[in-house]
Image (cartoon, rainbow, N blue to C red):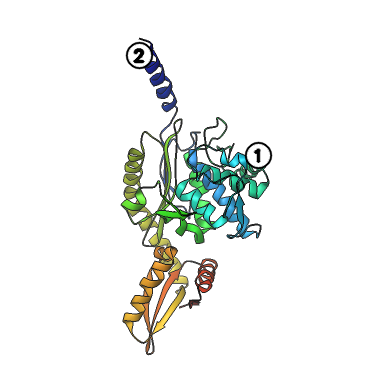
């Protein structure tokens, strides 16, 4: 009888916690921030690990400002190592690079890494949270308040589907050079391999990724970016009863609104093309044989994962075949070229 009472009590408590999770969704264009579909878009809920999108946004901002470098060491305090899973389980005073920390936040969704990065940037988690909320105000996230850098349960850590849409959109627009990282399926840190929680990356190549999240009180969440014909579509889903249910629903919605998104963007891009026909490209090779150019494209996409998100072309220039890829803006083109040149490979930014 006592066992039955305990089991019954356990079920009531857990079901009541699950009932707090509210279904909410937003589908739209991250570049224009136009919304195509929304349900409960302003309902406040626990964002779970979608909180880490803000942590990542601040990291990218700190790199841009010159306050951080990808090779900087991120040391783990005792407090950082005491965070609940998911985590890397790094020892006290041990460290990883910021480059590894970014991958760990995206792929592993490591809570110990989130705290270690927060302490690196602001000196303490508390000061970093203040920074997060200043960013939230600046980005006009009206229904958001952050209480930690990772999204573990806290009654004050709240956001909405629309606010996460706005935050994710800002990341897509302001830091496109980092989007290739969100497409990674697995990473290796300190000899250990970690696989992504985002199964949709494996299911459909159009997905660039972004972030998944789950705590019991929130249900299963996702911020999902897709790319078809150079057009981005962003979907947010809150409150799934399971990862599979969440994935199925967001996948259905993304497919449903992909055509609308493509038609709108084609019209806008056509009008721009009429004004200026110039394209920004990165030339990566020049060979006398087209077969060598084709092999070079395969070599480059294998060596640099982030190049897979761009369309590669081969053009004829006199006696030579040149391989190149189209890039949306000069800032991104120059950033990519710098990474390629670090490996002592040819790379030239041009307009055609």
Outermost residue, bottom side: 319
Of helix, strand and loop, which one carries label 2? Answer: helix
Q: Quadrant of residue 263?
A: bottom left
Residue 30: where, in percent of width, then height? 46, 52
Callout 2 environment at 10 Å: few (<14), some (14 to 19), or many (20+)?
few
Answer yes or no: do the residues labelled 1 and 2 have beta carbons within 8 Å? Answer: no
Q: Earlier in the sequence, mark 1 or mark 2?
A: 2
Give the label on residue 126, or none. 1
Asked whether 72 or 294 is in front, the reply is 72
Res. 264 in view: yes
Which circle, 1 or 2, is nearer the viewer? 2
Residue at the spot 38% in from the left edge and 21% down from the top edge: 11
In this figure, what is the number of numbered marks? 2
Horizontal side of residue 116 vs 285, given as left or right: right
Residue 332, above or below 189:
below
Asked whether 309 or 137 is in front, the reply is 309
Res. 135 in view: no
Q: Which residue is mark 2?
A: 4
Residue 66: where, in percent of width, then height? 65, 60
User: In which quadrant is the C terminus drawn?
Assistant: bottom left
Horizontal side of residue 164 vs 301, given as left or right: right
């Amino acid at each position: 009888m006592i066992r039955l009472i305990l089991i019954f009590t356990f079920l009531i408590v857990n079901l009541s916690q699950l009932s707090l999770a509210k279904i909410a969704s937003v589908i739209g264009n991250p570049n224009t921030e136009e919304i195509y579909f929304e349900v409960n878009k302003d309902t406040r809920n626990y964002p779970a690990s979608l909180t880490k999108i803000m942590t990542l946004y601040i990291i990218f901002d700190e790199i841009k400002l010159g306050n951080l470098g990808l090779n900087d060491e991120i040391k783990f305090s005792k407090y950082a190592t005491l965070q609940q899973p998911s985590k890397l389980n790094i020892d006290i005073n041990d460290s990883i690079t910021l480059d590894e920390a970014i991958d760990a936040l995206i792929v592993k969704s490591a809570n110990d890494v989130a705290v270690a990065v927060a302490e690196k940037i602001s000196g303490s988690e508390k000061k970093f949270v203040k920074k997060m909320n200043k960013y939230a105000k600046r980005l006009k996230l009206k229904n958001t308040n952050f209480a930690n850098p990772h999204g573990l349960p806290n009654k004050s850590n709240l956001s909405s589907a629309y606010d996460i849409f706005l935050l994710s959109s800002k990341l897509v627009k302001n830091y496109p050079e980092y989007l290739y990282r969100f497409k990674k399926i697995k990473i290796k840190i300190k000899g250990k391999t970690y696989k992504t929680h985002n199964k949709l990356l494996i299911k459909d190549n159009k997905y660039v990724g972004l972030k998944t999240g789950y705590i019991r009180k929130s249900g299963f969440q996702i911020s999902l970016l897709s790319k078809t014909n150079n057009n981005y579509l962003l979907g947010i889903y809150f409150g799934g009863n399971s990862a599979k249910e969440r994935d199925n629903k967001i996948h259905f919605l993304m497919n449903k609104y992909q055509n609308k998104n493509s038609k709108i963007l084609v019209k806008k891009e056509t009008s721009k093309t009429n004004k200026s026909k110039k394209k920004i490209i990165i030339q990566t090779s020049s060979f006398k044989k087209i077969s060598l150019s084709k092999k070079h494209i395969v070599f480059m996409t294998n060596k640099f994962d982030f190049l897979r998100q761009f369309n590669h072309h081969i053009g004829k220039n006199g006696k030579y075949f040149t391989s190149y890829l189209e890039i949306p803006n000069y800032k991104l083109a120059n950033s990519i070229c710098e990474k390629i040149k670090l490996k002592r490979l040819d790379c030239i930014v041009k307009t055609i």
